[in-house]
Amino acid sequence: MKKATIFSAAALALAIAVSSFTIHANKTEEATITSPAPAEAGKWSVDRAHSNVRFSISHLVVSEVEGKFKMFDGALEHTKPDFSDAKIAFSVDVNSIDSDNEMRDKHLKGDDFFNAEKYPAMKFQSTSFKPLGGNKYKLAGNLTIRDVTKPVVFDVIFGGTTNAMGKTKAGFKAKTTINRFDYNLKWSQATEAGGLAVGKDVEIVVNVELNKG
């Protein structure tokens, strides 16, 4: 039970992750994939079957535990071909957290962490999407977990665009690290050596494939 509780924190971190909004194009043999290049203005929605929201956090100082959220949604809208004016919104269903341990997931959904009953969704709203050259961007925005909203910045890689399955698709991958304590995810336990059983820093990686229209 104690071990399950420890791992719970890991899953929790991912929630944050959720906020983060990214995309990574799924490439098929039939698809004609283009290198990162300007895209026509428009609205894009997340293809959930080819996207994922994952996180990792240190455990007992010496290793890492990973988790994911199964249910999420998001949208991107832009008028400039380089996405520099993109507006991005993303949300995650806290109850869909999956750390590969049912007891741990139940703990994560409780008030020690997310309190999914009272705060069922984590949300991210972008404030800027800055091109850095090549296929790299900086995504800034506000992430809300429980009743706390704080600014976060993601490092983003644009995978390119492609036409596949009768649709125009685009892919992005975003990564950031957050401090879980900033969002009142404060369950903690010390190791015998004095370190945190579950680390405070959570790495979040979001891969998103978008459908245009």
Image (cartoon, rainbow, N blue to C red):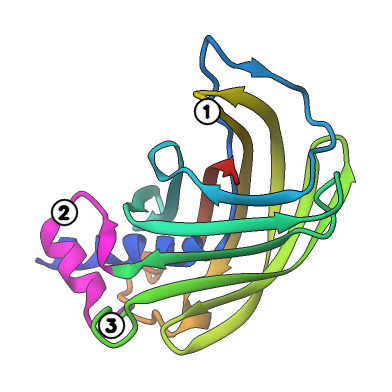
Find numbered disc 1 in the image and state the secondary structure of the residue it sits on. Answer: loop
Q: Disc 3 or 1, which lies upstream in sequence?
A: 1
Q: Are marks 3 and 1 in contact (CB under 8 Å)?
A: no
Residue at x 85%, y 45% (from the top left corner): 82
Residue tagged 2: 101
Q: Position of residue 58 (x, y in %)?
A: 42, 56
Residue tagged 1: 26
Q: Can you say whether 143 is above or below 83 in the image?
A: below
Q: Are marks 1 and 2 in contact (CB under 8 Å)?
A: no
| Magenta segment | 95-113
Q: On the image, which quarter does residue 39 sit in? A: top right
Q: How many marks?
A: 3
Decide which of 98, 77 is in the foreground and name it: 77
Residue at x 36%, y 65% (from the top left corner): 198
Q: Can you say whether 21 is above or below 124 in the image?
A: above
Of marks 1 and 2, the one in the foreground: 1
Decide which of 146, 120 is in the foreground and name it: 120
Q: Amino acid at mark 3?
A: Asn
- Crowding near the residue tagged with mark 2, few <14, some 14–19, many ≥20 C-alpha atoms within 10 Å: some
- Asked if the stretch drawn in magenta spans residue 104, the answer is yes
Residue tagged 3: 115
Q: Amino acid at mark 2?
A: Asn
